Amino acid sequence: MKAFLYTVVEAEEVFFTHSLAELLERAKEADPDFAHVEKAAKRDIYYIPTCYPNGLPGGVPSRFYTDPDEAQQAMLLAKSVLEMVEKKLT
């Protein structure tokens, strides 16, 4: 998402956020086609809790994320964003 945004938004603007929801909002402003992947914003619920060992109070993330269907859905959401960005950058 950031690669796409850096190509379509003024070069001096820096994107400090890691929130896919925020990045998708900005991408939709630049290109309405990104509305097709806005469900991927749900991936934000996985970002911090799964990346940092202390992201969830009282336990390590691997104890909370055990549903293979949920993992598959998260991967499909990520893939939809990657495919859209690839399409727009080529």
Image (cartoon, grey):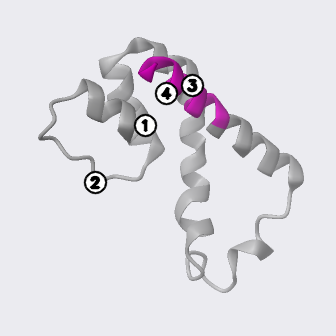
Local packing at callout 2 (Cα closer than 10 Å; few below 14, some 14-19, many 20+) is: few
Separation of marks 3 and 2 at Cα, in angstroms: 21 Å
Above-or-below relation of 6 to 74: above
> Residue 1 has which mark?
1
69 versus 53 height, above or below: above
Helix, strand, or loop for circle 2?
Answer: loop
Marks 4 & 1, CB-CB < 8 Å contact: yes
| Label 3 – label 4 distance at C-alpha | 10 Å
Q: Disc 3 to disc 1, how far (Cα)?
A: 11 Å
Residue at the far right: name it.
68
Indicate whether residue 35 is drawn in magenta: no
Q: Residue 37 bears which disc, if any?
A: 3
Q: Give the mark toward the camera: 2 or 4.
A: 4
Residue placed under numbered mark 4 in the picture = 85
N-terminal label among 2 and 4: 2
Q: Is residue 3 left or right of residue 53?
A: left
Secondary structure at badge 4 equals: helix
- Residue on which the image places disc 2: 16
